[in-house]
Structures are given as C-alpha cells and as structure tokens.
C-alpha cells in the first residue's frame, strides 16, 4: 500500500543535501512525502552528531516524533538516520528505544525497502559503530573504485524515464534528489569525508575519508538544480580545498568553477568550507577572478595562536592568516570572509586568547562564529591535559563573542554607500520590502540585506542595491536599477 513519510533535517547544509537524496529515493520507490510528521506513516530524522548541543537537538527531535505515536495521528514509525545514527549505530538504538530503527549510510541505497519493513513491524538490527575512514584505501587515487556507500556519491537506481516528476537523476542516473525547501538557493555536494586529523573533531570517523564526486556528476546536478529555479549554488563538503586530490588533480576545483558558473540560469556559485593551510594561490585566483563565482571565502581558522593550533593538529598563526587575507583582498578588495573559532581549548592561556583577539581585530571578517570548547568523545583532544575550567571557558566565550559582534558590525558599516548585487529570497509587496543576500553573505550562517522597496522584485531575482544602513551584520539597502 502507498506509504507517507516526513523528513526532519538537522545540522548543516551537507545534511540538507542528504535529506533531499533520501527524499528522491523514497519518492522514486513509491513513497509520498508529507510536510507534517503527524500526517506520516514514518518520520525520518536526519540527525547531526557534530557537538554535544547538536546531539541533544537530534535526540529531542527523535523523542518529539516518537510522542506522535499512539496519539491519534498516522505516525507509526520513527527512524534515525544521518550523522548521529551513523556514528553510534547499535549504541544509539539501545539507548533510545523510542526510535523504531537506527539506519546508517549503508542503508541509504535501499531506504524505501528498509522503511517498508520497519513500518510493517519488522525489527531492524542497527550496525555496530565503526571508523569509516578505514573503509577506503589510504591512497586517495585508489578510492574511486572502492565499493563504499557515501551519501551523495551514487548507488544503482531507476532509469530517468521511471522517475516521478521533480525527482532528478542528478548525477547521471545514479544519485536521486527531490528538493524539499524550494527557493532560489541550494547546496550542492562536492565531496564527502575528510583526511585531516584535527584533534578536536570526530567528523572524519563517521563521515569517512575524503572522497570527491566526479566533475561530470557535479555539473549534471547543477544543471538540474538550475532547471528547478535555483540561481545560487553553495558548494559544500567537509573540505572543499581538497577537491580532486583523489581524482588525480588537486587543481580540479579551479577548472570546475568556470563550468559551473556557465550553467544556464545560475547567477552565483559560492564555495564553502575552505582550509587555510590548503588554500593555494590558483584557487584564490579562480574564486576571485571567475565571473559568476562569489568573492566569498569561508575559512576554517579555528584559532590564531600557534600554541593552540599545534595542539589542534593545525597549521598557521596570526601573521600567516593576516597575510592570507591580504592576498585574498589584493585579488578581490570587497571579498567577504568568515570563519569559526574555538575558545577554551586544552592548554589555551590568556596570552593565547589575546593573540586570537589581535587576529580578529585586524582580520576584518564579515562573520565570526565563536564556539566554547568541550570534550568530544573519540577525539584526541578529549585526552589532553591542561583543561581550561568551565567558568573560564564561559568567560572567554562571552568575551570573544562580544568582540566578534562588535567587529563584524564595524565591518558591515564599512560597506555603507557600496553597491551590491543582491539575490532576492523573500518579497513582501504589501509592506513594500524584500530581503536577500549579497556576495559576502552565505545562507543561514551570515547576515542578510533588507531592501527598502519591492517593485518588480520576486524571489530569485537579482538587483543592484546601495547600502544605506546596517543593524549588526545585516544591511539596509535601496534598490538601484532594474532587477534581472
């Protein structure tokens, strides 16, 4: 019998892409997608397993979905998928009996059949937790032929002629995708996994080693997204600067960007998740010099004190990072730059915090995410000595967060009087206003631009606008000229 399914997505843009692949596979298998969990036979919660707060949100969402069972609604089964499910597998299933099943990445290829069996009352044995880095060859160029399941990298599926309307054979006939949110912006997965060994990060253990998608697959999916009305692509991965190293060409992203920017219907391509230690001059030139590619640099600095960075198993320092930003702005003077930083890392001293504050003050970043360190199980840093006390971590977090808010607001003020190309996302004709984002603003993580007039605008249109004010990182601008 026909079944209905609702998807709840938590976490980052990479998870959004994974949810849309699951949606495409389910619809191609005869499932009907519904928005409300209370209307669904099954609820798939695509979990996040990055940090403790994200894990809690995932557990809370699973429990909330489980509360719908037996309350008069249609919900019969609640299933955990995504990073938390992959990371903990059987352990999560035992600790959370409210969920009817815990599925890992290896289940995605047959998600329709798995879900049918679960809704029908069959028991599912969750996988044992394992380090997915060990599933791929150590040598990157040997990975493409390895028979390992990775979301977004394709599994055998139905032919295009057998698919329902709106379901894409996005990467040739192998990766299916159904858009869930609509709108003029969409993430597009470049790669999955990571080969770096940052001492605070557990992501590589459950996402696996770095694996690039073939350029032809990426371009095919970009064309399909443009046909769906997407005007901006956000390229996502765990480390976009590594793209192509397992395909035998470390500069493959430089060649791919012009091809993506040339896709009919696209106005902007944005690259996210850049590692400063791997950001080569040719990639800076490709981002800054390719028409249709946003002058935007999402740089994972994490700290700027050499002492802390070495304990993090990372490279660089304040002066090296400032020099990198200077080279970026030499190529693109108005480029947007954002980063995340961690305070309270084991061994961090007041001198290290002062060094971080010096860097942030001189860096002129458009957006800064500040995180308070906490031990993450399975990471090297969890075993480090010289832990910073919770009260001190909280004080440093508050202090650096306050500084970051002040500095990013000043950076927004620097853009007063500038003309920006704004991609319109929402329009309120009754109020005569609209909202969108400029090149230096990525969706959800950065600020936005409020437009003072809505005449001729619609979601997905582009318009030139002159900045006349700001509120923190958010800008206020007057449209100038006609939209396109």
Image: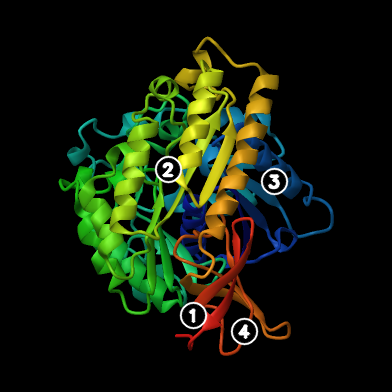
Badge 4 or badge 1: first in the primary sequence = 4
Tag 2 secondary structure: helix
Look at the image and tell me whether residue 472 can be seen.
yes
CA distance for labels 3 and 2 = 22 Å
Query: Who's the residue at 68% across and 27% down the image?
Result: 394
CA distance for labels 4 and 1 = 10 Å
What is the crowding at mark 2: few (fewer than 14 residues within 10 Å), some, or many (at least 20)? some
Q: Quadrant of residue 94?
A: top right
- 446 on left or right of 38: left
Residue 372 placement (x, y as % from top left) = 60, 30
The tag on residue 227 is none
**Depth check, front residue: 174 or 123:** 174
The tag on residue 454 is 4
CA distance for labels 4 and 3 = 37 Å
Query: Who's the residue at 46% across and 36% down the image?
Result: 359
Badge 2 or badge 1: first in the primary sequence = 2
Query: Which label sits in the foreground, 3 or 2?
Result: 3
- Whether pointer 2 and pointer 4 mark residues with C-beta atoms closer than 8 Å, the reply is no
Q: Which residue is mark 3?
A: 61
What is the crowding at mark 4: few (fewer than 14 residues within 10 Å), some, or many (at least 20)? many
CA distance for labels 2 and 1 = 44 Å
Q: Which residue is mark 2?
A: 106
Badge 3 or badge 1: first in the primary sequence = 3
Badge 3 or badge 2: first in the primary sequence = 3
What is the crowding at mark 3: few (fewer than 14 residues within 10 Å), some, or many (at least 20)? some
Q: Which residue is mark 1?
A: 463
What is the crowding at mark 1: few (fewer than 14 residues within 10 Å), some, or many (at least 20)? many
């Amino acid at each position: 019998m026909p079944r209905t399914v609702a998807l709840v997505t938590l976490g980052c843009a990479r998870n959004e892409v994974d949810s849309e692949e699951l949606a495409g596979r389910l619809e191609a298998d005869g499932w009907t997608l519904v928005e409300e969990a209370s209307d669904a036979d099954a609820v798939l919660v695509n979990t996040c397993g990055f940090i403790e707060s994200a894990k809690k949100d995932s557990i809370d969402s699973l429990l909330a979905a489980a509360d719908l069972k037996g309350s008069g609604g249609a919900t019969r089964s609640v299933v955990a998928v995504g990073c938390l499910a992959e990371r903990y597998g059987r352990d999560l299933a035992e600790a959370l009996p409210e969920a009817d099943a815990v599925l890992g990445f290896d289940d995605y290829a047959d998600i329709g059949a798995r879900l049918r069996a679960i809704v029908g009352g069959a028991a599912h044995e969750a996988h044992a937790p394992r380090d997915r880095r060990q599933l791929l060859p150590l040598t990157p160029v040997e990975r493409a032929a390895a028979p390992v399941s990775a979301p977004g990298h394709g599994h055998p599926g139905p032919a295009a002629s057998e698919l329902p309307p709106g379901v894409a054979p996005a990467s040739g006939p192998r990766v299916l995708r159904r858009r869930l949110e609509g709108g003029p912006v969409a993430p597009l997965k470049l790669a999955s996994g990571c080969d770096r060994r940052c001492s605070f990060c557990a992501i590589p253990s459950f996402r696996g080693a770095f694996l690039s998608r073939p350029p032809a697959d990426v371009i095919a999916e970009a064309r399909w997204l443009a046909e769906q009305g997407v005007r901006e692509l956000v390229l996502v991965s765990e480390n976009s600067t590594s793209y192509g190293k397992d395909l035998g060409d470390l500069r493959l992203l430089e060649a791919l960007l012009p091809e993506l920017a040339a896709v009919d219907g696209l106005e902007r391509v944005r690259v996210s998740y850049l590692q400063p230690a791997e950001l080569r001059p040719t990639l800076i030139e490709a981002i800054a010099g390719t028409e249709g590619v946003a002058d935007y640099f999402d740089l994972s600095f994490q700290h700027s004190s050499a002492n802390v960075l070495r304990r993090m198993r990372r490279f660089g320092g304040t002066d090296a990072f400032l020099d990198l930003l200077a080279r970026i702005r030499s190529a693109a003077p108005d480029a947007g730059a954002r980063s995340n930083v961690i305070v309270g890392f084991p061994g961090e001293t007041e001198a290290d915090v002062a060094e971080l504050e010096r860097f942030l003050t001189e860096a002129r970043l458009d957006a800064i995410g500040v995180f308070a360190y906490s031990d993450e199980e399975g990471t090297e840093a969890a075993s480090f000595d010289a832990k910073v006390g919770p009260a001190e971590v909280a004080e440093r977090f508050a202090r650096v967060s306050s500084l970051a808010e002040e500095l990013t607001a000043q950076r927004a003020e620097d853009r007063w009087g500038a003309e920006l190309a704004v991609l319109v996302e929402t329009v309120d004709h009754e109020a005569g206003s609209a909202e969108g984002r400029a090149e230096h603003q990525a969706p959800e993580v950065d600020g936005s631009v409020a437009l003072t007039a809505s005449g001729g605008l619609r979601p997905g249109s582009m318009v030139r606008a002159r900045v006349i004010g700001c509120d923190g990182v958010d800008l206020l601008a007057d449209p100038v000229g006609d939209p396109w």
